[in-house]
Amino acid sequence: MNKARAIRRFGLCPVLLSLPLGAATCDSLASLKLVDANITAAQVLPAGSFLPTGPAPRPAALAVYKALPAFCRVQGVSKPSNDSHIEFEVWLPVAGWNGKYMGIGNGGSAGSITYTYTPNSHGLADALMEGFAASSTDTGHKGPGDDYSFGKGHPEKSIDYFYRAIHETAVEAKAIIRAFYGAGAKYSYFDSCSNGGREALMEVQRYPADYDGVLAGAPSNFRTRLQLEMVWVSEALSAEPGSHFPSTKLPAIEAAALAACDARDGLKDGVIGDPVGCRFDPLVLLCKGPETDACLTQPQLTALQKIYAAIPQANRFSPGTSRGAKPARPMPGLAGLRVPALVRVPLSSALRVSSQASSSRTLAGE
Ligand SMILES: [Ca+2]
């Protein structure tokens, strides 16, 4: 019996006909029993009707939401510890599911569900548009993506942020997918960047059964060393009043590094195949006349040389910024940053603290 005949005969909607035998309705997922989680809401949202709570979305995000097909939106809370409150969502296409599951990660300190594209990752909406059943979590706390205060005095919340929430959400999402479609996903993937890339690596290391493949974009792993590197870069850029160089000089820096090392890998393609082996000396960029975006003043040159150099006595902590990378790309809050006196500790002390922080490194994904 084809769909049209079935609809005429039984009055079934096309959505139900697209689901295999044994599938649950979206509404009934509200009573689905999960191991460490409760489902707080489950409902089908008509096409183009999704709007997140909170501030009005950016126009680009709003356009994505308006283009969404109808989907089953499941919201839940996972509590794997007494101090856990991990909010998550699972979005399920009501038609045209591609049979696959996509876990979505979080940039920075997380603190919110990733609904659509941010600089750090794809979102639920983007995965849904491609036919995936997808999940995202706030990783156990609420807040802006640069606020880590949630972890102070709350070690369980730190664990949730660092790796447990992503795993819990994968487990719950797979159970929800099985219930809704009557069959599990054929393949499961995880896609995210920055902190989300670190989340991807943690999944691979701690819970290799969660995903068949991960996209670990620009992972901010080796977190304690990464933070040390950021202090190092900030120190270099604020060593004296003229040390900081504007982002308008980055193209010239990148071009000079490529000119020195691009062809070393046998192919002049704009990619330095072995950035660690590149011995590009930014001295060639020293201004010989008036300062322009094509050259660096002596203080700026000194800063760049420090950024490229490995932290003294600390090769094992950081090899320095790769030649050909865009050093000191203007990150929010970093451009022009003066390192406060509070963190102007002797480097040897910082290294000692970093090397002793083995437990936190393990926690942070190293
Ligand atoms: Ca090349």
Image (tube, rainbow, N blue to C red):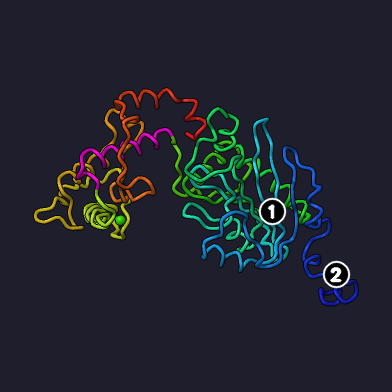
Where does residue 65 sit, x and y in percent of width and height? 60, 64
Residue 74 to residue 348: above or below: below
Report the residue marked by disc 1: 185
What kind of residue is marked 1? Answer: Ala
Asked which quadrant contains residue 170, the reply is top right
Q: Is residue 138 visible?
A: yes
Q: Who's the residue at 46% across and 25% down the image?
A: 358
Residue 366 to residue 302: above or below: above
Q: Which residues are magenta?
A: 224-244
Q: Is residue 208 visible?
A: no
Whichever of callouts 1 and 2 sits on the residue coming sooner in the sequence is 2
User: Callout 1: few (<14), some (14-19), or many (20+) C-alpha neighbours within 10 Å?
Assistant: some
Q: CA distance from mark 1 to mark 2?
A: 25 Å
Report the residue marked by disc 2: 12
| Relative horizontal placement of residue 306, taking residue 92 as reference (left or right) | left
| Relative horizontal placement of residue 113, taking residue 351 as reference (left or right) | right
Nearer to us: label 1 or label 2 = 2
The answer to whether the residues at label 1 and label 2 have Cβ atoms under 8 Å apart is no
Q: Who's the residue at 69% across and 36% down the image?
A: 79
What kind of residue is marked 2? Answer: Leu
Asked which quadrant contains residue 161, the reply is top right
| Relative horizontal placement of residue 303, taking residue 208 as reference (left or right) | left
